Amino acid sequence: MKVVNVDSWTDYQQALRQLGHLDEPRKPMPHYVALNEHLLFRGIGNGEWALETTLERSYPLERSDAEVSLLSYYRKIFLSKPVIETMSGETWGNIPNLPEFGGLLQKSNAGTLNLALSGNPALCEYLVYLRHHGFPSPLLDWTASPYVAALFAFDAMDRTAKHVAIYAVAQDKYTASRFDAGQEFLVVGQYIRAHPRHYLQQSRYSLSIGEKSINGWPSKDFLFLPHERVLGENVNPGLLVKFLIPATERQTALKHLDSMNINPHSLFGSDESLMRTVARRECLFKEWGYF
């Protein structure tokens, strides 16, 4: 991974203009292209934090197992589906049942799993819905906009942070990158039925997985793997970039983003995000004078 320290918000914008000049990828990944329209971004409120999913961050004290498989996770979300549908009013009637999903994995490998998932749009929509509404998820959310990513980094910045981080990764134009040792980086979700904020935020979602052979039926499963491990081991350093921006640039960045209409309300559309946006304009961007 290539780490780029920038001294200011202005320098970050300059660095973005240079992203189209990243080093050419090494073989054997000729389909990677380092152009802005193929880059995905993720903003994090502390430069020392890793690329972690909400599933990785959930129940750290209670869960002793370090590895979670796709099949075991699917069982949990499938069993949860009736109560989620009942209470939310949403339905995902076309997703595979447990035996069908096991059979799907049986036929898949790290080169075909993406095709199997993309062939089940209701399943992708269910996974994204769970991710948006707080169910622990193996999906890592990204955005096609480096400025939306910056808003997420600075908006809820960790109070102890010295820098925020914005990751940029070159997206495979075929939406999946297959690596040695059965590892795969999948990107889904550009055009799916989802909450409006999915499109407001230009969202994408990634899965980082590896093949796992197990005894019994089905004979194949996939483990969720840390994103930084899979990308760090397999991607040219020029195609995975971590920008570190000083935390002291927060006000400058947020004010500039707000002038571009990139703020909590424009990305979430809720009453709570409206209050945060208006309060920030009055309490952060203006002086505390009497008049």
Image (cartoon, rainbow, N blue to C red):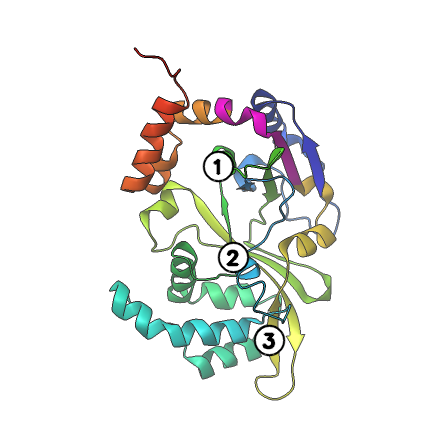
Residue at x 26% of width, y 70% of height:
86
- How far apart, in angstroms, are the residues tagged by discs 3 and 1? 34 Å
Q: What residue type is labelled 1?
A: Ser
Q: What element carries label 3?
A: strand
- Nearest to N terminus: mark 3 or mark 2: 2
**Nearer-the-camera pick, 286 or 270:** 286
Up-down: is 48 above or below 120? above
The location of residue 78, given as percent across then percent down, is 41, 74
Q: Mark 1 points at which residue?
A: 145
Please provide percent x and percent y for residue 215.
Answer: 65, 86
> How many numbered marks, from 0 up?
3
To which quarter of the image does residue 230 belong?
bottom right
Q: Earlier in the sequence, mark 2 or mark 1?
A: 2
Up/down of 81 relative to 278, above or below = below
Residue 24, percent across and down? 71, 39
The residue that label 2 is drawn on is 54
Cα–Cα gap, marks 3 and 2: 21 Å
For marks 3 and 1 on the same chain, the one whose residue lies earlier in the sequence: 1
In the image shown, does 40 or 5 lie closer to the viewer? 5
119 left or right of 229 in image: left
Q: Where does the N terminus fall, quadrant-wise?
A: top right
Tell me the tag on residue 221.
Answer: 3
Magenta span covers which residues? 241-252
Quadrant of the rendered structure where residue 271 is?
Answer: top left
